[in-house]
Amino acid sequence: MYNPFAPMHPPRTKLYADPQGKLLHDLVFATAERSPEKIAIVDTSTTPPREVTYAEYADLVERMARGLIAADIRPQQVVAIYLPNCWEFCAAFHAISYAGAVSTLLNPSYREREVRYQLENSEAVALITDGPLIHEMDLKGLPALKNVFYTRTGAGAAEPFSKLLKDRANALPWREFDPLTTLACLPYSSGTTGLPKGVMLTHANLVVNVFQTLIPGEAGALTPDDRMLCFLPLYHIYGLTVALDMMLALGGTLVLMPRFDPRRSLELLIEQQITMAPCVPPVLLNWSQQAEEGRFPKDSSLRWVKSGAAPLAPELALRFTAQTGVQIRQGYGMTEASPVTHLGFLEPEWYRPTSIGYPAAQTECRILDEYGNEVAPGECGELVMRGPQFMRGYWKADAATASVLRDGWYWSGDVARRDDEGFYFIVDRRKEMIKYCGFAVAPAEVEGVLLEHPAVRDCGVIGRPDAEHGEIPMAFIILRNPQQESPQLAEDLKDFVAQRITRYKQPREIVFTDSIPRTASGKILRRELRQRLETS
């Protein structure tokens, strides 16, 4: 356990492998050459689960890449994936890379307006999805969109995914590309203001981050014998890098769940002999509660879990390990960093589950006060970083890019401190973001939807701390006609939001008020709204 007299851990400097010149799909094909008969993916969304070997996976990726090119998809054009976790998502992602195109990834719970926004903003020329997801959507009028492919169930004019898998001999262009400048992925990040922004990640960004996250030589380092359970959504950069790309580069086995299911997740720990699982704090809370009730398996192979995407309460970190015997490696990152910038340790002398640990290799960090000066150990300031995993910038948003990338440094907006031993702790996240079950919710997006309701004159949205979900969105609303205030109207407003954007963004609480505090320039003073909660 923790030894207060242990020396500082040396900085991380070594990558798992040399990333020089490597494109993202190179990692997959290299593993397929080493271990062709090994199981790469187990897809539990089918009955029985579908097992895909590395040789089969490489063949699927190559055939699909040729199919995309035959569908007139050109280098650096954007192809959207709008699917839950499944083998088709994985193969499509790497095939788009191999074809020289760029993936943009959509949350499968998105509503029509969110889907249309991302497709239009990204200028996606093709969409890979499934019938039930788009059955009631109108995707007409998107100027760039030329092709829609469905994976398992047809819908409208969509073409079958199998069309992309036919044997073809057309040429592939990928050897022409420079990993340092060529885009591989365009995930969308909910920034602190406005609508989500596309994050331009190059092949080099993603490859380096895989090699940073594998942290060779440390306790708990993953090997090709590991079997990872992935219920994290692959459209999210955490699942994409730390699960899909990392495991396939390593040569391990990735066991996919379409979504987190408490009972089924514990069954799969045993059935699939899972050794590691990337998690978010609400999952750790659920497993901890199941352990209290005697349902967490005592004979599982689970060695450790990673916690990320949202702050981990110190008491939960300690409670989870005490109840399950499973260690936690906490980490930190953001979409703009592909995503990992910090990782904790599993060695007893450096085990601090309440810390985000040390920076990844080749990642420089500074903690600055409001005047841009470095603070002393133990003092708080803004976490500012740079490294090869950081994005090229935001898609079609130069001003937003300039606000966070300054002279090569990424300004996170998060408040952190570093102790005398070099361990980092996140003290406060970006003030305006709400983290619901690890998902980022931009208050401005929810406010924009609420203001479309004819009864709403003004509103302000904040996050309220919640033991189960981390935070829940809640809205303060000024009505055009205060006489309309009622519990039924509050429910109607919640439903109004849920029908227009994905359900996790909807306010869980509505507070009717006669004022929304604002600055002279009109910006909502969310700290004053939070103070109202504290005094109510």
Image (cartoon, rainbow, N blue to C red):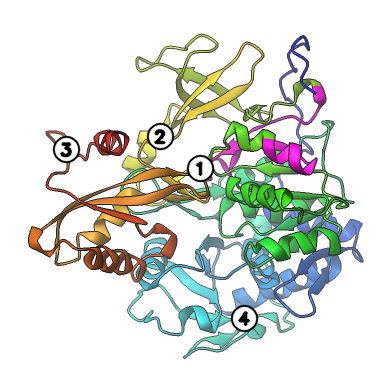
Distance between the alpha carbons at the discs numbered 3 and 2: 24 Å
- SS for dot 4: loop
- For disc 1, the neighbor class at 10 Å (few under 14, some 14 to 19, many from 20) is many
Name which of mark 1 and mark 2 comes first in the sequence.
1
Q: Position of residue 521 (x, y in %)?
A: 14, 36
- For disc 4, the neighbor class at 10 Å (few under 14, some 14 to 19, many from 20) is some
> What residue sits right under mark 4 in the picture?
151
Locate the C terminus by quadrant: top left
Name which of mark 4 and mark 2 comes first in the sequence.
4
Distance between the alpha carbons at the discs numbered 4 and 3: 48 Å
Distance between the alpha carbons at the discs numbered 1 and 4: 30 Å
Q: As rendered, which of 101 and 58 lies closer to the eye?
A: 58
Outermost front residue: 293
Q: As rendered, which of 310 and 326 lies closer to the eye?
A: 326
Name which of mark 3 and mark 2 comes first in the sequence.
2
> What residue sits right under mark 1 in the picture?
336
Q: Position of residue 69 (x, y in %)?
A: 60, 74
**What's the amino acid at mark 3?**
Arg
Q: Are marks 4 and 2 in contact (CB under 8 Å)?
A: no
In the depicted structure, whether residue 378 falls above or below residue 12: above
> What residue sits right under mark 2 in the picture?
404
- SS for dot 1: helix
**What's the amino acid at mark 1?**
Glu
In the depicted structure, whether residue 222 falls above or below residue 230: above
Please provide the residue range marked out in magenta: 319-348
> What residue sits right under mark 3 in the picture?
518
Name which of mark 1 and mark 4 comes first in the sequence.
4
Q: Position of residue 115 (x, y in %)?
A: 41, 69
The residue sitting at 56% across, 44% down in the picture is 309
Name which of mark 1 and mark 3 comes first in the sequence.
1
**What's the amino acid at mark 4?**
Thr
Name which of mark 4 and mark 3 comes first in the sequence.
4
